[in-house]
Amino acid sequence: MSIITLTTDMGLRDHYVSSLKGAIYAQLEDATIVDISHEVSPFNISQAAYFLKNVIRDFPTGTIHVIGVDAEPNVNFSQPSESELPMIMKFKDQYFVGVNNGLFSLILENNKHQEIWELDDVLSQPELMNFPTKNILVPAACKLARGEDCKTFCSEASAIKRAIPLSPVLEGHTLKGSVTHIDHYGNIITNIDKEDFYRLGRNIPFIIYFRQKEYFIDKISIGYNDVPPGEKVAIFNDAGNLEIAINKGTPDNGGGASALFGLRLKDIIRIEFTPRGSRETLESLF
């Protein structure tokens, strides 16, 4: 029996997530359900893709990921090619069940999918639209879990809708990235990865700075405890993304990095590299 994961923007206050799980168990009594997150910001497919990209490598072959974020199909009868229909994508030998609204391209990034299929029978069942994650996506996931072939209940899809993610930009000796996620601890996760960071070469002095000039970091640490509690720290996290944190700081104790630095989603993070001879002093950066 395959694992079925759930990623939604439904929160946990209401009954919606329990309804999804009940619908799965009604079809698969021995199902294994894993919650990835139900706290995705409403309709934020970029955040949903971020969560999924960070866990794919941890799940076994055959895992089925149900993505209930912006999950209502958008049918364009005048231009059918512009419709956003439910889709199944096979990638890294796992299955992703969601809506073709740009989400899948964000999961893939520059990689290639193995297969894509459309759940186009929903066009004749508009009553399913009142809770599409439960009424459309979950039944498809359960069919996959039972070993049914996609071609028996789907049509082959021709293309995935592309969403353009924010990417780091290199301008001279300056690398500009942005905040893509702020986690439970108030840590700032950016879209700058190790490859971006070291594109200018290793062992080159640098300064990471934010909206307030008095805050900057000029060292990449191995872990949070490389600095004393309450001090700012920059690391490459488990996914390889540049993360800025306050050691032992959280929003609850007033020490989260996002609160201290006044940073929000999509805010710019600048890294200025100083190859030998290009700068003389730290003060010249400001």
Image (tube, rainbow, N blue to C red):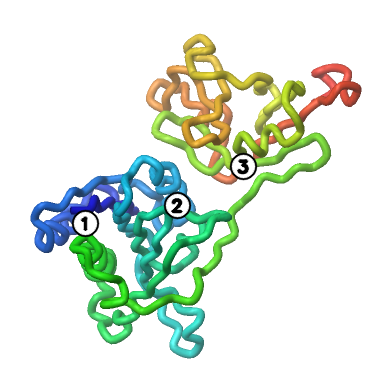
**Considering only vertical position in the picture, is 108 above or below 71?**
above
Three-letter code, disc 3: Ser
What mark, if any, has residue 49 been given in the picture?
A: 2
Q: Residue at x 44, y 74 (%)?
A: 84
Q: Residue at x 47, y 54 (%)?
A: 107
- C-alpha gap between disc 2 and disc 1: 21 Å
Residue at disc 1, secondary structure: helix
Q: Residues within 10 Å of mark 3 (few under 14, many from 20)?
A: many
Q: Nearer the viewer, residue 13 or 51?
A: 51
Residue at disc 2, secondary structure: helix
In the displayed orientation, state which residue is furthest to the bottom. 78
- C-alpha gap between disc 3 and disc 2: 16 Å
Say which residue label 3 marks.
178
Residue 22: which quarter of the image? bottom left
- C-alpha gap between disc 1 and disc 3: 32 Å
Three-letter code, disc 1: Tyr
Three-letter code, disc 2: Ala
Q: Position of residue 182 (x, y in %)?
A: 47, 37
Q: Residues within 10 Å of mark 2 (few under 14, many from 20)?
A: many
Q: Quadrant of the C terminus?
A: top right
Residue 264: which quarter of the image? top right
Say which residue label 1 marks.
16
Marks 2 and 1, the one that precedes in the sequence: 1
**Considering only vertical position in the picture, is 39 above or below 126?**
above
Q: Position of residue 150 (x, y in %)?
A: 30, 71
Give the label, 2 or 1, closer to the camera. Answer: 2
